Image (cartoon, rainbow, N blue to C red):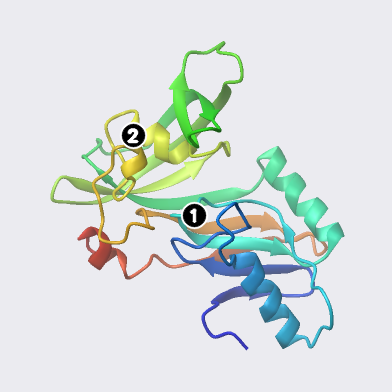
């Protein structure tokens, strides 16, 4: 059985794994191995399943982001979990190291965002711009070090590159996120953004399921920040 995959939660309906920075959740034009491939192989070996293994993709994390990655083990679970993400009822908590030092307290960032699929970038635009989507999050500073800040983030919407562009547009780019003006880290495949927890309703038991993934210890080396 693969030892490189860290399992956070597993039952007959859900599988949560720790996504490393740089890993693809699903396939793209690069053809690189995906976290989904590894997770299917883990299920196949653990449960001795012949043939193809079903795992439903219910949310996405950007390739340079680390943290909790949740898959569904049945089509019914996939439908129910996907609906929670679509309705915005999933409670998400991220941590990020950013350049700069926002004031203390809880802050709300609200923008209209539009994605350029050709360049795979997202921009802040005026309300009313065709194709723009309303985006909002809350955050607070957890600690500070050398004009940098560790923030805790609670996205209220789930737009492409939302956290990255909302902070960058205010002069607080995420460390390592050179696409949006962040300081370059020593790992070009990683940015200092981590999906630390998800709270979802279990698709069959109807209880809250809290999925946790600790911050990567490698951040100290990659971004020269305390961990």
- Which quadrant: the N terminus? bottom right
Residue to which mark 1 is pinned? 63
**Residue 99 locus on image (x, y percent):** 23, 43
Q: Is residue 227 visible?
A: no
Q: Earlier in the sequence, mark 1 or mark 2?
A: 1
How many C-alpha atoms fall within 10 Å of the one at disc 2: few (<14), some, or many (≥20)? Answer: many
How many C-alpha atoms fall within 10 Å of the one at disc 1: few (<14), some, or many (≥20)? Answer: some
In the orientation shown, which residue stands out farthest toward the left? 146
Q: Secondary structure at mark 1?
A: loop
**Residue 82 locus on image (x, y percent):** 74, 49
Q: Is residue 161 visible?
A: yes
Figure check: 226 above or below 145: below
Left-right relation of 201 to 145: right
Give the foreground label among 1 and 2.
1
Which residue is at 57% across, 10% downward?
128
Which residue is at 58% across, 39% downward?
158
Figure check: 35 above or below 223: below
Q: Secondary structure at mark 2?
A: helix
Question: Camera-side residue: 96 or 3?
Answer: 3
The image quadrant that residue 39 belongs to is: bottom right
Which residue is at 75% across, 81% downward?
44
Question: Camera-side residue: 150 or 171?
Answer: 171
Q: Which mark is residue 168?
A: 2
In the orientation shown, which residue stands out farthest toward the front? 30
In the orientation shown, which residue stands out farthest toward the right? 76
Cα distance, mark 1 to mark 2?
A: 18 Å
Which residue is at 74% across, 75% downward?
11
Question: Camera-side residue: 105 or 26?
Answer: 26
Report the number of discs: 2
**Residue 227 locus on image (x, y percent):** 27, 66
**Residue 226 locus on image (x, y percent):** 22, 63
Left-right relation of 61 to 181: right
């Amino acid at each position: 059985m693969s030892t490189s995959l860290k399992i956070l939660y597993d039952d007959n309906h859900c599988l949560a794994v720790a996504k490393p920075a740089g890993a693809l959740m699903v396939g793209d034009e690069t053809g690189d191995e995906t976290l989904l491939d590894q997770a299917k192989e883990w299920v196949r070996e653990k449960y001795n399943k012949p043939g193809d293994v079903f795992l439903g993709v219910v949310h996405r994390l950007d390739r340079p982001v680390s943290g909790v990655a949740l898959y569904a083990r049945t089509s019914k679970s996939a439908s129910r979990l996907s609906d929670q993400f679509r309705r915005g009822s999933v409670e998400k908590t991220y941590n990020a190291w950013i350049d700069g030092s926002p004031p203390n307290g809880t802050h709300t960032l609200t923008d209209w965002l539009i994605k350029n699929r050709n360049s795979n970038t997202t921009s802040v635009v005026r309300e009313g711009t065709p194709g723009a989507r309303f985006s909002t999050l809350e955050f607070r500073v957890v600690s500070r070090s050398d004009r940098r800040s560790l923030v805790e983030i609670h996205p209220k919407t789930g737009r492409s590159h939302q956290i990255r562009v909302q902070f960058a547009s205010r002069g607080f780019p995420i460390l390592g996120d050179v696409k949006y003006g962040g300081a370059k880290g020593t790992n070009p495949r990683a940015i200092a953004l981590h999906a630390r927890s998800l709270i979802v309703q279990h698709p069959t038991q109807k209880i809250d399921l809290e999925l946790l993934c600790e911050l990567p210890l490698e951040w100290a080396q990659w971004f020269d920040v305390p961990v």
